[in-house]
Image (cartoon, rainbow, N blue to C red):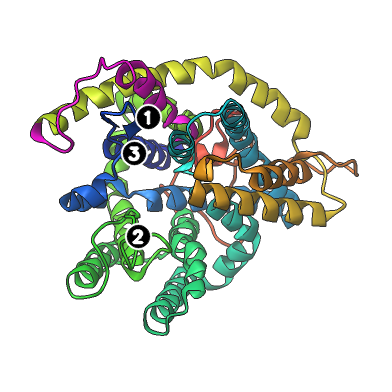
Amino acid sequence: MDRDRYVDFLRAFAIILVVLGHWLITGLVHGADGEITAPELLAVVPWTQWLTLAFQIMPLFFLAGGHAAGGSWSRARTAGATATGWVRQRAVRLLLPTLAYCGPALLAVGICTAVGVDPYTLALVGWALAMQFWFLPVYLILTALTPALHRAHRRWGHRVPVAMGAVALAADVLVMAAHVPYVGLLNYVVVWGVAYQSGFCWRDGLPTGRRRWLVPAAMTVGGGAAFAALVTLGPFPVSLILVTGQVPSNTDPPSAAMLAWTVAQVGLCLLVAPWARRLTDRERVWRVVRPVGGASMTLYLWHMLPVLIVAAAFYLTGLAPEPAYASSAWWALRVPWWVVLGIVMTGVVVALGPLERALSLLYEWTRPHTDPRRPWRLWLGLAATAAALTRFAVQGLAHDGRFPTLPALGLFLGALLVLLPERAAPLRDTSSPGPVESGATGPRPGVARPPGVPVSESERGCGVPRTPLP
């Protein structure tokens, strides 16, 4: 079958917007005392919160991730693999590039702490290096739940994401009305899980029928209308990215407004799929999409490093022009700011080539050709790494200018529990290579792939370690 290039286009499109969005809101100010600060644009200039409607595209990652994970697990299940073995395969593919990023970053933080770097500066750098980490523990959890979620999908189909949405709304009511904040943590799984579970449905052509386009059209219109109502008439802000001091938030945890936006975005992606597939079938478009999608994990993890490099090269030296923050001249300089960061990012990707090849070899060594004999190692390791990554996402890599000893130990010890191979009777290898994404798959037993719906590159596998994000 042909590749479903549209899935890979969504991933490439999403990663570009994530990178550009983070670079846009990161504005540096060189103070009179020589310190570099990064004012929070969304808080200082409130109208910029409307820009988050264009840059909040994480539903695309989870939609594509569900599409690929559903295919990978279907193939593994058909070949006789166990849920534990499959989850370990996927976790290894996520954790290897994550460790390759966290190791040097934490080493740098440790050295800076030892030599007495200013705690405020160190905390700012540590925040910049970890601001994207929230995605990783959420995706680890959804990966661990995939066999159960897919079992529910096989039984109830598109009713599962509907039920997850209802749970998310109930949790939000408890948070807002009954003031039970910890219930809201459930929404990290169920809100993003709506997009992830929708990926299963999309892959299997659900819903069926001659007017199947009506469902994504209703999702687009209904989700957009619900978001507008919740923002204008309800208690929710328009910003789809966390703003310090803003209560309630649409992302911490994901709110009913975030759910509505997720439904609208997923619906729109499915609605335009026939037209978009014709576009991505063009070789000229594909030559751009493929390398970006292939390097998406590298781009996602490392894209704030160019900001630090440019800050040191141009702001600490006073070479960069510094108009008043958020002034017209400042906005005009956003385009060259993007260009310079893009050039540096290209250099970073090229420089990471040897590391990626080393990761490829390491993946083959740790690649789980066997079913784990001690499943507790996997689940304990996943719990420890998810907890550590959550801590980094919330507090950065150098909270209060200090080295994060316990989270760092939790990350690396937990990852060792997941990565170290066990010796057991070999099973047939059912996983496609790659640290995060993709698994080759055929039609799922009992649910035939609809005619004309191609297999995505995500389902075929793109190689290690340059594979797309889910």
How many C-alpha atoms fall within 10 Å of the one at disc 3: few (<14), some, or many (≥20)? some
Q: CA gap, disc 3 to disc 1?
A: 20 Å
Residue 301 drawn in magenta: yes
Q: Which residue is mark 1?
A: 289
Q: Residue furthest left?
A: 328
Residue 349 drawn in magenta: no
Name the residue type under label 2.
Answer: Thr
Considering only vertical position in the picture, is 69 above or below 27?
Answer: below
Q: Residue visible at 75% across and 50% down?
A: 85
Q: Which secondary structure, mark 2?
A: helix
Find out whether the residues at labels 2 and 1 contact each other: C-beta distance under 8 Å: no
Judged left or right of residue 110, residue 235 is left
Residue 345 lies in quadrant:
top left
For the record, the magenta segment spans: 300-328
Name the residue type under label 3.
Answer: His
Which dot marks residue 22?
3
Name the residue type under label 1.
Answer: Val
Image coordinates for residue 75, horizontal then vertical, percent: 65, 49
Q: Residue visible at 59% across and 37% down?
A: 98
Q: Which secondary structure, mark 3?
A: helix
**Is residue 82 visible in the rendered structure shown here?**
no
Judged left or right of residue 333, residue 169 is right
Which dot marks residue 262?
2
Residue 17 lies in quadrant:
top left
Q: CA gap, disc 3 to disc 2?
A: 20 Å
